[in-house]
Image (cartoon, rainbow, N blue to C red):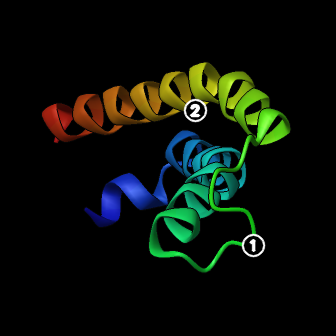
Amino acid sequence: MKDYVANLWVRIGLVLVVAGWGPLLAVIFLSAVGLWPDPNPNPIGLGLLFFVTFGPAVACLGAGALQVRRSRRRQ
């Protein structure tokens, strides 16, 4: 697991996941629990942020995972 976190592409993908997906998931969770002021939120901006960061995050995580697997096979 340390090999994956040490990879630059995996780190970039994780930053995109946290920064791009985190706000939307936080609003969904807080609304479901009842801590969000609006019981039925419509987070358009956060949904667009999720949409824009989904593809690059998955691509970066996949590229990093492939690099780590290749480096493990060489050893």
Would residue 44 be found to the left or right of residue 73 on screen?
right
Whichever of callouts 1 and 2 sits on the residue coming sooner in the sequence is: 1
User: Which amino acid type is shown beneath numbered disc 2?
Assistant: Ala
In the depicted view, which residue is nearer to us: 59 or 17? 17
Would residue 44 be found to the left or right of residue 29 on screen?
right
Q: Residue at x 75, y 72 (%)?
A: 37
Percent x, y for residue 29?
50, 64
Percent x, y for residue 44?
80, 33
Secondary structure, mark 1, is loop
Q: Examine the rendered structure and indicate whether residue 38 appears above or below residue 11.
A: below
Residue 13 quadrant? top right
In the depicted view, which residue is nearer to us: 72 or 20? 20
In the depicted view, which residue is nearer to us: 17 or 11? 17
Q: Examine the rendered structure and indicate whether residue 53 appears above or below residue 19.
A: above
Judging by the rendered image, the residue that carries numbered circle 1 is 37
Percent x, y for residue 48?
77, 27
Q: Examine the rendered structure and indicate whether residue 7 appears above or below residue 58.
A: below
| Residue that sits furthest to the bottom in the current view | 35
Residue 27 quadrant? bottom right
What quarter of the picture does the N terminus occupy? bottom left
**C-alpha span from label 1 to label 2:** 30 Å
Secondary structure, mark 2, is helix
Disc 1 or disc 2, which is closer to the eye? 1
Would residue 32 be found to the left or right of residue 13 on screen?
left
Marks 1,2: beta carbons within 8 A: no
What quarter of the picture does the C terminus occupy? top left
Q: Residues within 10 Å of mark 1 (few under 14, many from 20)?
A: few
Residue 43 quadrant? top right
Judging by the rendered image, the residue that carries numbered circle 2 is 57
Percent x, y for residue 23?
69, 57
User: Which amino acid type is shown beneath numbered disc 1?
Assistant: Pro
Q: Residue at x 46, y 74 (%)?
A: 33
